[in-house]
Image (cartoon, rainbow, N blue to C red):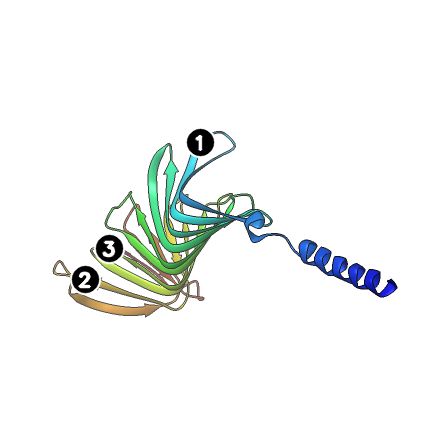
Amino acid sequence: MNRFYFLLLIFLIVIGGCKTGGRDEKEISQSINSLNMNIYSNKGKKMLSINSPYSIYDKDKNTFNLKETTIKLFKNNESEYIITSEKSKLSNNNKLIELDGNVLIKTLIKQEDKLYSNSFIWNIENSQFLLVGNVKFENNTITLSSNKAILNKKNNIIEFFNPVKYKVNDSNNNKRYEVKSENAYYNIDTKSVSFRSKEERVRSKIYF
């Protein structure tokens, strides 16, 4: 009899351990189809909208993992930039956005301007976008490329980090010349690019 109760006790311990060994994955994460999210500033102004056909929300980490993401950035309630990527992550109480895979930024200020990269990081509390990996900016007249760049949406200037390659095309989109340089700065508003080296005496600026 003692043997029977002993085996029963072991059985109950094993069953109890199986039930309490971990939380159900469904309790931790939740899938969302056709996510449409708007994020506003403390003053109630619309800052951005995020759209994704499929996403997963991690309750423990308070993080959204999204696929085929489209983000629109607003200024004075009007779209200023459109950003797309293969996947993205929204974390830190919806303040940190990380995009990966064929990231494309299009500005509505100069509609021919396009900015590409492998990845994109933005803390929405500041005005700078960090782009890393195969960064390329192009429009009808110029192509700038580097491995790292920062777009400041306050002054609409893109800083490309050394080494930088750029080329200028003619009206038929044929390459006229190609140059390698150190840091370059492209001003979206004035359509000008300036180059700077570590030696402050070496500077140049080109308008297109």
Say if 143 sits above or below 50 in the image: below
Q: Is residue 81 above or below residue 17?
A: above
Which secondary structure lies at badge 1?
loop
Q: Is residue 145 visible?
A: yes
**Dot 1 corresponds to which residue?**
45
Residue 202 seen: no
Q: CA distance from mark 2 to mark 1?
A: 40 Å
The amino acid at mark 1 is Lys
To which residue does mark 3 refer?
Answer: 139
Residue on which the image places disc 2: 169
N-term mark: 2 or 1: 1
Check disc 1: other Cα within 10 Å, few if <14, some if 14-19, many if 20+: few
Q: Secondary structure at mark 2?
A: strand
Label 3 vs 1, first from the N-terminus:
1
Q: Give the image location of residue 129, x and y in percent.
A: 44, 51
Q: Position of residue 103 (x, y in %)?
A: 36, 56
